[in-house]
Amino acid sequence: MQFEFDQSAPLYQQLADQLAEMIFTGLFAEGEQVPSTTQLSQELQINPATVLKGMNQLVDEQLLEKKRGRGMFVRAGAQERLTTKRREDFYHDYVVSLVAEAKKLGIEEAHLLDLIKRGYDHGQV
Amino acid sequence: MDKFKVRGISKRYGKKRVLDNLSFELEPAKIYGLLGRNGAGKTTLLNIITDRIFANSGQVLLGDATVAGNRAALAQIYLMSEADLVAKHTKFSELATVLDATYGFDFTEARRMLAGFDLDDQAVLAKLSTGLKTAAKLVLALNVRANYVFLDEPTLGLDANHRELFYQELMKTYEARPRTFVISTHLINEVQQLLEGVIILDDSKIIKDQPVADLLANAYEISGPAAKVDEYTAGLTVLTSRQLGKIKTVTVVEPLPDQRVIPDQVKLAHLDLQHTFTALTNKGGN
Amino acid sequence: MNKQVLTLTKWQGKAIAKAVAVALAIIIGLDLLFGLIGLIGGASIGSWTSMLTNFLGTLSGILGFIAFFWALCFPYQLFKSGMAVGATRKGIWGANAILLAVMVVLIWLVDLLKDLVLYASKGLSNFADGAGISLATAFAGLATVAAVGAGFALLSRRGKLLVGVGLPTVLIFLGIVALRVLVAVVDKDPNRFNNHALLSLSGAAGTALFWAGLIGWFLLMTALNYWFFTRTQLRRD
């Protein structure tokens, strides 16, 4: 399991975020079952209540759904929902710090735009 | 299931006050950590709430009934103690049978767990090494059908592999049969993720009694230029303080003032449970 | 009797039974050994009666010794074991009391059997009285030892030393003094004791007063024993 936890945020939040990432990258496709609370709890040695809290958050965000007697599955449209959300957060998560760093280094706005253009031309994204 | 209530427990040994008016509650089916430095009174507290020694004052209740001398209540409470209490030649299987009479015992599950630790039920506890003895006692503790299970130093002598196995088995049995566990241990980092609530005992008093997530949400390490750090933490209770040249690092365990802006070169990080604990219980830090 | 007391009794009972078996095996083994050596040396085999009574006498002696020893020295270990398995103090006391009672009855039965074999000629009615008294006395005696043992279990290490060494010393000293006084008095006036004390003591056996006293003492010791048990706590040493 590709989980890594630190003290940056509550454990249940980190778990939810990392599961969301796995859904976003397609590791768990839509309609696919994700590991159960039991499995995660035992595998990662995390209190089941914490695991449940994280997964319930993803249910609230409509990324996961509970199928009676069968477990938790990735909900249809989850990937799209995540993309939309991340687009909304893009400015705050990336642009703000990028501009701040550029300013620290004395990079002018025009120069920064040039760099970004270079990234689109050369980068793989 | 009933709540486990401790009210106003005090205990003196001679002139020394070991426990001072302790009160707390345990909820059913939750995993708690009971943390405290050596000599803080953890074992004394555990012995009092399981009716092995008498407090000088206070009450222990399960639901509305006092626990002391109460057979029905005591059949819901189990303490895995650090000390070796049974006679030297006692076998695991004997103990399991006797425990079954008071609590009910999961023989099949126990055998499976024993195998995981390379033990079998004919083992004579006193003849095992410290680590294996702990493992055997653990298997007993995880398979009694009690609703409140107290584990005093459950990792004593266990090697890393066995500790991981213990944590796995704990999670497994907790999910299969939800009940309250209270773990008293010094290996705080290892159990942090297993706990829901934490009770910290320091110098005969309870200094923290809250969900782990809540405690850690307000546990910070603040570092930066000494003057800026001091300015930012003015009015807060600084628990520990270190200085490396111009850089000062302090710890606080309380909510940070929202309206105060974090100065430019000052970095904030959350503490893990172990560092939070050491910060709270370090004498001479203030 | 509840399940807990029953299980505790069985558990502790097994341990005692093992101890008895081991002790018996050793003593009988030694007996046989010496008997064999004697045979080789030319001695004759005793009658079956004497061998049986020897065996029974040994058995009751061992049982008696173990009961005495156990009542005196094991209450605290019992308490610890009980605590480890979630028993109540009452339950532990109950198991202890049952076991001691069983041992007393066993010892008495074995003694009875031995006397039967030996004095087959005597009528059974002669037994009843003596047997009843010896049973009651045995109960009272063991209850006393049990109370002492339980009280002992309450004491700290230092208390144990004080009482365990100090008290016998004091008692022995007092005993010697009493003996000397007794000897001195009897010397001066031998007739004095012929009437009252000794006669009335032997005459008392079997009277209502004697029984009342015995039963009263037994109840007192049992109550003390129970009280000690309910005050026992786990010790740090």
Image: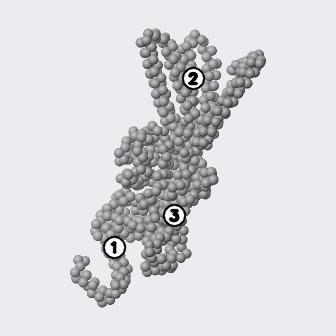
Q: Which mark is residue C97?
A: none
Whole-percent x and y of residue B222? 46, 73
In the picture, the quarter occupied by the C terminus of chain B is bottom right
Q: Chain of mark 3?
A: B
Q: Which mark is residue A82?
A: 1
Is B17 placed above or below B101 here? below
Residue drawn at x 49%, y 46% is B83
Type of amino acid under label 2: Trp
Front label number (3 vs 2): 3
Residue drawn at x 56%, y 19% is C112
- On the same chain, marks 3 and 1? The answer is no
Whole-percent x and y of residue B160? 37, 54
Q: What is the C-alpha distance between the residues marked 3 and 1?
A: 45 Å
Q: Is residue C183 left or right of residue B148?
A: right
Residue drawn at x 58%, y 55% is B18
Front label number (3 vs 1): 3
Front label number (2 vs 1): 2
Residue drawn at x 48%, y 68% is B219
Q: Chain of mark 1?
A: A
Q: Which mark is residue B282?
A: 3
Whole-percent x and y of residue B37? 51, 58
Q: To which quarter of the image does residue C94 belong?
A: top right
Kindly indicate whether the residue at mark 1 contacts the one at mark 2 (C-beta within 8 angstroms).
no
Type of amino acid under label 3: Asn
